[in-house]
Image (tube, helix red, strand yellow):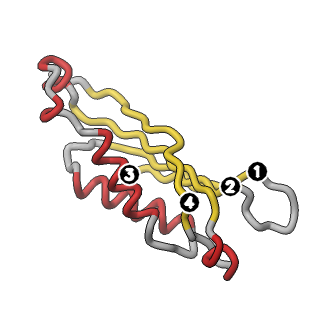
Amino acid sequence: MGIDAMVKLEKMKFHSFHGCLPEERRDGNTFYVTLEYEYDMKPAAESDDLSLAIDYSVIYKIVARQMEHPSLLLENVALRIAGAVKEAFPCICKGRVTVVKMNPPLGGPCENSSVTMDF
């Protein structure tokens, strides 16, 4: 019997250039990405062997690569992150990604906007 448990990387911070407005694509903004995923971690947990686990630093690099490619929509960013993580780690049985844009240009005060996608 395996052990499915959730791993969560919270608020990975990036300066990226996502958005529909020219100034968003020129100046960029602060974004946070939270990624949660489940996989059978029993082999890694029992052996304390990183090679049997999903290395958090690899996940971070995957997310960072996706954040480097500007998108008009947060929906597209979330979809690309989910796809890239799942492609790299097919052992993930389910996951969730949240992409947060700080101070979105809405014409009034708004702390952030976000998209959350299950995969």
As helix, strand or loop, the secondary structure at mark 3 comes to: loop
Which residue is tagged 1? 111
Numbered disc in front, either 3 or 1:
1
Work out whether 116 lies above or below 1: below
Question: Spatial distance from mark 2 to mark 4, Cα to Cα?
Answer: 10 Å
The image quarter containing residue 48 is top left
Which residue is tagged 2? 102
Which residue is tagged 4? 15
Numbered disc in front, either 2 or 4:
4
Residue 59 percent location from the top left of the image: 32, 47
Work out whether 12 lies above or below 16: above
Which residue is tagged 3? 119
As helix, strand or loop, the secondary structure at mark 1 comes to: loop
State the residue at coordinates (58%, 55%).
Answer: 31
Q: Amino acid at mark 2?
A: Met
Q: Earlier in the sequence, mark 4 or mark 3?
A: 4
State the residue at coordinates (48%, 53%).
Answer: 117
Q: Amino acid at mark 3?
A: Phe
- In depth, the one of 79 and 20 nearer the eye is 20
Question: Spatial distance from mark 1 to mark 4, Cα to Cα?
Answer: 16 Å
